Image (tube, coloured by chain):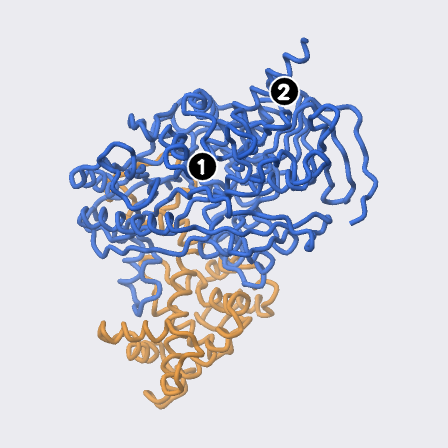
Chain colours: A blue, B orange
Amino acid sequence: MTEKSITEYHTPYDAIVIGTGISGGWAAKELCENGLKTLVLDRGRMVKHIVDYPTMYKDTWDFENRGLQNSDLIQNQYKQNRLWGGSLTRPDKRHWFVDDVKHPYNEKKRFDWLRGYHVGGRSIMWGRQSYRLSDLDFEANKKDGHGVDWPIRYKDIAPWYDKVEKYIGVSGQNLGLKHLPDGKFSEPMELHCAELDLQKKLNENFNDGRLLTIGRVANITGNAMHEGRSNCQYRNRCIRGCPFGGYFSSNSSTLPAAERTRNMHLRVNSIAYEIVYDDTTKQASGVKVIDSETHEKFFFKAAIIFCCASTIATSSILMQSKSKRFPNGLGNDSGELGHNLMDHHYAVGASAEVNGFEDLYYKGHRPNGFYIPRFQNLGDGKTDHKNYLRGFGYQGSTSRTNWKRNIKELSYGEDLKNDLMKPGPWEIGMGGFGECLPYHENKMELNYDKLDEWGLPTITFDAEIKENELKMREDMKNQAVNMLKSAGFKNVKGHLGKAHLGACIHEMGTARMGHNPKTSVLNKHNQIHTCKNVYVTDGSCMTSSACQNPSLTYMALTARAANHAASAFKKNKKA
Amino acid sequence: MDRRTALRNLSLGLGYTIASPSIFSLLSSCKTETSTWSALFFTSEEQYIVSHLADIILPSSKTPGAIDVNVPQFIDLVFSKIETQTNKGLFKTGTKNFAKTFKHQFNIDVIDGSKNQIKAHLDTYFNIPTNEKNKVYLLTNRKIKDIEQKDFQRYSIYKFLLWVKYYTVFGYFTSEEVGENVLNYDPIPGTHIGCMPIEDVPNERLWS
């Protein structure tokens, strides 16, 4: 593509944040609250809290054809449609997922890249499960030699976990576990009767410390104040956007906070494609942007740049930022940029029928399930007997079956009708979330032969799980079966699907943190080692994946890095 | 069907209020239960059979039945707008074969058959021992291209009947009337109780 003329803005911002998702929202809030004039970019459309949640109040019968849709309608979302039986492209939420024809990518090996190009990004659709990493995780690479050592330890991030949990609102139960640290939680949601039963049975039947707790989830409970938001109303329609602000999203929380400072300039439809490196200052001078609608190009300058565009997009921008000093992408002296791509591997677990409890039910739609924290290879002697490294946790839930329970059976009549109006038998399902080791050869590349509508290179994925993960998956299935059987549940069925990277939507690791510029991209403050005014705080910074859902860690690292950047900026200003 | 129900039923879908030329006759002649609406997909024979089957699968009693919440219209809509060409064709073949075996049993055309006769004929397919049912599920879980000629009639009839069963139950329980007034409708619960006695739930029915 020929270089079109570019409009240069001469007045620099104090900071630019690329992306408005779970990380970008936090960067915007912290930088703006520190007084920095901040340009916040998003490549997609505006989504205003409440105003732009078109399906938030709809019941099934409010949707055309009760939400059933012709497969022709979703052809342009054929990759977004691959997960969870196509549920992400149903009419209640398909507007949050990209058009795969307009936004193509390439797969040497299957990689599910689920994206939302709009303000708030995937913070609107995220699963909200919020768990801290511990020193078991931060020390893992160093101990077993995979990847490189994390340049931080739990004590470095703990205060930031505190700050983030208090601000976003996380409900959960403190357990005093060393490998799954306690947090600043509001009151936990309740377990269902059958879950309480499993909790008791696990305690009785296993001596390796495994336990069941209610999920730690970023939905508000209790009495704490959260500006502009109220408690979870138990509708379990979070993914549509919540009119109550009952769960955390950038749109409901961090972006309004940044807005209130009057220091934020939010620019939508702005595709960042290059960070410009200035050889004289040895720093980045700004960000080049294409307007997605007009295809006009702009160059915005700033003293500090935060990359929060999501793992793949951030790494792609850095790889596209080629200069004399960095011919292979900004900060890529190590050659690790775009490598070590990880996700959690899942689609493995067990389900069963639960006998009894027919006289018990629940009220409200709990947007949460139970959690069984990791109980393998904890370094305590008792759990270190596995034929694989690292470990996994489980998420699951119980429910009473509803009218769908025999919808495919040969039966009819008034008794059937009356029966289907009542809650059916209890059932339980749980799935593992396993750690994925960082492998250099698991990578993303830029494909300059296949450009998108804006003349930018598309991304090609070449990554897969390997032997350690495959062995772990066997255990993930077997332990799930063991637990459900030992609880006395009936018709226990283990399942072990194929793990495609990306499918857990926890992709991470392509611009990792580390001690050494020769083997990593970022330092302990999330700065590019060799270009310190560029910070990377989304999933690409992760040195290892651990097995916990990662968003809380992205937020804590972002808040920490933004305050580091802001205090350096203010110090410089005074000097 | 009373006039009130007919009026309420009009809210089923905009497609119907525009597509149906007989909308005024529907309002002025609220007598027969099954043939007062113009189908988008069904032939009159299909409409007759599906309406009776839906009525038999979820009959009206103290609570509304499938006909009361426009299930036949919903199934017509699904096959008109949602289902694949292959399934549309198979649905039609299955209905024809059902009509054929009906005629074989009663020696009259199904369109002249009574609800009781259709029910009796349905029983020959539904009211069978469990091991026979399991064979049916194995058969109907197969793809159409894998079905041998000798099994095809049986396959098509069961596909048709199980579609009617599926969409009758689906259409019934996703209707506004059932969702709001039959099941326990609580769109903004406000609280969550993890474990409560079922007798504290109205009519001990599902939350919708």
Q: What residue type is labelled 2?
A: Thr
Mark 2 — residue? Answer: A261
- Left or right of A270? Residue A119 is left
Q: Do labels 2 and 1 share a chain?
A: yes
Give x and y (percent) for residue A196.
Answer: 23, 39
Looking at the image, is B156 positioned above or below residue A59? below
Mark in the foreground, 2 or 1: 1
Mark 1 — residue? Answer: A544
Give x and y (percent) for residue A263.
Answer: 66, 21
What residue appears at the point 38 percent right and 56 percent down from the top-left corner? A497
Looking at the image, is A22 positioned above or below residue B27? above
Q: Residue furthest left?
A: A204
Give x and y (percent) for residue B186.
Answer: 39, 42
Mark 2, secondary structure of its residue: loop
Quote the CA–CA distance across marks 2 and 1.
Answer: 35 Å
Chain letter of the residue beneath label 2 in the structure image: A
Q: How crowded is mark 1: few (under 14 residues within 10 Å), some or many (20 or more)?
A: many
Mark 1, secondary structure of its residue: loop
Residue situated in front as seen by the camera: A70 or B123 = A70
Residue situated in front as seen by the camera: A12 or A51 = A12
Dividing the image into 4 quarters, which one contains the C terminus of chain A? top right
Looking at the image, is A77 positioned above or below residue A136? below
Q: In which quarter of the image is residue A234?
A: top left
What residue appears at the point 52 percent right and 70 percent down from the top-left corner? B84
The numbered mark, 2 or 1, whose residue comes first in the sequence reads 2
Residue situated in front as seen by the camera: A255 or A17 = A17
- Left or right of A8? Residue A82 is left
Q: What residue type is labelled 1?
A: Ser
